[in-house]
Image (cartoon, coloured by chain):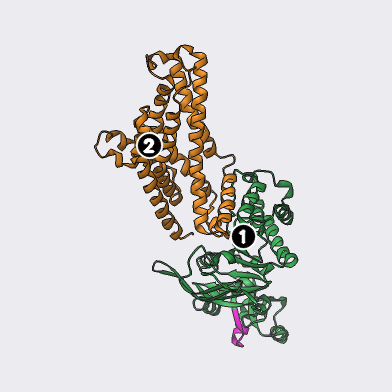
Chain colours: A orange, B green
Amino acid sequence: MSSVTYYRSSLSAETLKLKNTFALWLAILAPCALLSMNVLVFWSKGQHFVTDGVNPWHRFAAQNFGVYALLLMPIYIALLTSLTNGIEHKANGWKHLYALPLPKSTIYTAKATTVLGLVLLSNVVFVVAYLAAGLFLSMVRPDLGFDAMTGLLPVYISVLKLFLATFVIIALQFWLSIRWSSIALSMGVGIIGIITLMIALRWEYIHYYPFAYPFMAIKGFPNETSLQNVFGQEVLLSLGTGLLVFILGYFDVSSKRIS
Amino acid sequence: MNPFIIETHGLSYSFGKHQVLHDLELRVPKGAIFGFLGPNGAGKSTTIRILLGLLPVPKGQVRVHGQDLTEHRIDILRRTGSLIEMPTLYRHLSGHDNLEMHRRMVQAPFSRIAEVLQIVGLTKDAHRKTKEYSLGMSQRLGIALALLSEPELLVMDEPTNGLDPSGIREVRELIVRLNRDFGKTIFLSSHLLSEIEKCATEVAIIDKGTTLYQSSLQQLYQGTFQSNVLHLETSNNTIAHKLLTDHAYQLLPQQDEALAVQVQDRQQVAKINRFLIVNGLEVYRLSTHTQNLEELFLNITNRDSASVTISESIPALKP
């Protein structure tokens, strides 16, 4: 059998494993929760946010991006990876998985793909919920000007950049959660990441700090010029170091003795 | 053709400085139910983890299905099903979904799910979530998972651990049936000797990481370790005890009211009976008793230490 067949069968098993799990629901509900709260904010106090000459869609996106990139993503990725790998820790499943006629690298890659897929899913949900929220606001607050759907491309590009910029955080948290069964560890690392980011936000080298990549990715929003270039420094750094962490993580995990 | 499905040669393994296996030798014949016995900590689980490729083979050679384990791990695993202690069940999924997930990974045909459910008798409960399953059912589902890929060899580590008597029986009957009706070779580890005694055709006894004994169960019974013990009850056991020791009979530690004497054959039983009656004692009970596997096991695993000396010295201390 080829490695593609191995990978495909392993991945389809992983997706079935997510059925009825909190991890799957979290991927859908987390962005919805954030957006619905901001809908309430705009519904009641929208006039303070959307001033003359401001695109309400951009203002609304910016309102969401701040919390999403800075706070929600790191916590949410920690929770998502530890929940996904927690399925295996809870079922005592590693010994079982590694005794299957599958290469260890396939099992690892399929798991990593599942986690990446979940984060991607929640970003897609974010975009869909964002559009729905905007349309809803155009109905309940016609005065804010949401009926003119213009300039949405920068929003899509920003979400894409945001996703790519979280790659390194996903890789790190994936390794932590596959290595250790503790959810507290993953959450702790996520929270420390956020706190250090908030404290050091004005530091001149902050753009090298992995937890800052998602923030850097949306920093220029909605300034068009910085958004034209999808593969900016933070995205390339995130992809590069993320890939490195994934590979090193694999060597660490595959050499671990299963008992 | 190679008659052995598992062979190890000089297998050694250590966790850090602690050596768990010392030159372990195993030969598992095809078609056997192979009882792999040893007290806790003897190295059973380590051996099984090595056989399944979960631990590396640092020293020695392991051949499964005639292939070298380090070179053909995936080929070997494709022909091997395993159940290590508690089965890996995803409790949020139904029994059927657990099987389906596993089926996708081993790429078995879809129809195989119904077949294995039938074999382990879980067809009716297939769509219940596995968190509602009893321990016995979980264990049977674990066996069903192992059977999905139609393996020739099933490796099970303590499959009856933690089960109640009826659960133990369910699993044991299933094991025997898999061997008899489906021709599976079964490698079964246990510290429960009574379990192995009831179903194994071949046994290996290991302790401290070395094979102490390996042969068919029948040979084990007939072999050098077999001994007959005669239990005696008389009108005066103290006198009987003295008489027998004076005449160089070997007495074993006393149980309740009875005396236990080591005898070689049936003639000797009659001789002892006559001897006691002639000496004016009434004999109420005479019963022979073959040493069972349990005692045998303890004897083998403790051979160099306590058991033999104790059995000889304690009666002698009594007046």
Query: Residue A254: horizontal and vertical position, in percent?
Result: 46, 58
Residue at the image position 39 percent from the left and 68 percent from the top: B17
Query: Residue B169: horizontal and vertical position, in percent?
Result: 69, 59
Mark 2 surroundings within 10 Å by alpha-carbon count, few (fewer than 14), some (14 through 19), many (20 or more): few
Residue at the image position 46 percent from the left and 19 percent from the top: A40
B246 in magenta: yes
Which chain letter goes with mark 2?
A
Q: Nearer the viewer, residue B296 or A100?
A: A100
Q: Say which residue label 2 marks.
A: A229
Asked if one can make out residue B189 in the rendered structure from this viewpoint, the answer is: yes
Q: Is residue A220 left or right of residue A155?
A: left
Span colored in magenta: B242-251
Q: Say which residue label 1 marks.
A: B159
Give the quarter of the image for residue A71.
top left
Query: Residue B121: horizontal and vertical position, in percent?
Result: 73, 53
Element type at mark 1: loop
Query: Residue B163: horizontal and vertical position, in percent?
Result: 63, 55
What count of labels does the image hold?
2
Answer yes or no: are tags 1 and 2 on the same subunit.
no
Element type at mark 2: loop
